[in-house]
Amino acid sequence: MSINVCNNNSMSAITSLPSGVGGGSLVLISTQTASSSSTIDFTSGIDSTYKEYIFKFINIHPSTDSVSFDFNLSADSGSNYNVTKTSSTFAAYHGENGVESAVSYGTVQDLAQSTAFQKLTVLSSLGIENDESLSGTLHLFDPSNTTFVKHYIATTNFNSTSDFQMNSYIAGYGNTTSAVDAVQFKMSSGNIDSGTIKMYGVS
């Protein structure tokens, strides 16, 4: 029996996982770090090489209070981010006061055949305090397929402006048979003050 070993002992420095872990190896394609950035765009590396792409958000922090963290897809190499999407969202939350908690459907954040940006913060907003950053993942499936729609699943975790711990779940599809070849992330208002987004391919 062989033992799978990661290629680095530091979790932050791992660029790929050994084969057989999680059903496939993660291959780091690109890393972008925000610094008062209006958007973070991934306009290269999304092609037919992989059937699944994973974006990891690490301590995404806004420059403006009470905003959402959003994304959209492009089918023209980033000239336009306006792919039609349908999605559903819900969140589990718990207040710092230890009193209020629930699981609730996000009626405002879901989309129905809309070209609007998909919100990755459900039921509440991000704030500018240091304990109000966001981390999470977005999975984009088979973006280069020219027969089927483009499914996505996202999970994010953040402390809201109202001091609630929010765990958001977002799932939907880009309703296009054109190849999706670029993804943009931004705040609903203001800049991305700081944070890192890593894009991986799943082999």
Image (tube, grey):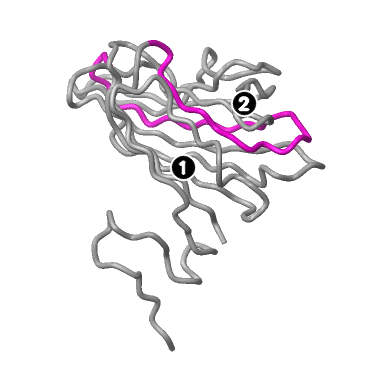
Q: Is residue 182 magenta?
A: yes
Depicted 120 relative to depicted 43: above or below: above
x then y, percent, for residue 161: 27, 15
x then y, percent, for residue 189: 39, 10
**Is 34 on the left or on the right of 145, as rendered?**
left
**Marking on residue 55:** 1
Disc 1 residue crowd, few under 14, some 14–19, many 20+, Cα 10 Å: many
**Marking on residue 29:** none
**Is 31 on the left or on the right of 138, as rendered?**
left
x then y, percent, for residue 71: 51, 26
Residue 159 appears in the picture as rendered: no
Q: Amino acid at mark 1?
A: Phe
Residue at x 49% of width, y 71% of height: 19
Residue at x 30% of width, y 33% of height: 195
Residue 20 appears in the picture as rendered: yes
**Is 165 on the left or on the right of 52, as rendered?**
left
x then y, percent, for residue 130: 17, 25
Residue at x 55% of width, y 32% of height: 183
Q: Quadrant of residue 177?
A: top right
Between 159 and 42, the residue placed more toward the observer is 42
Depicted 141 relative to depicted 81: above or below: below
Residue at x 59% of width, y 34% of height: 182
Q: Quadrant of residue 133?
A: top left
Q: Name the residue at the bottom extreme.
A: 1
Magenta region, residue range: 161-189
- Provide the secondary structure element on which disc 2 rests: strand
- From the image, state whether disc 2 or disc 1 is nearer to you: 1
Image quadrant in which the N terminus is located: bottom left
Residue designated by label 2? 87
- Provide the secondary structure element on which disc 1 rests: strand
Q: Amino acid at mark 2?
A: Ser
Between 106 and 174, the residue placed more toward the observer is 174
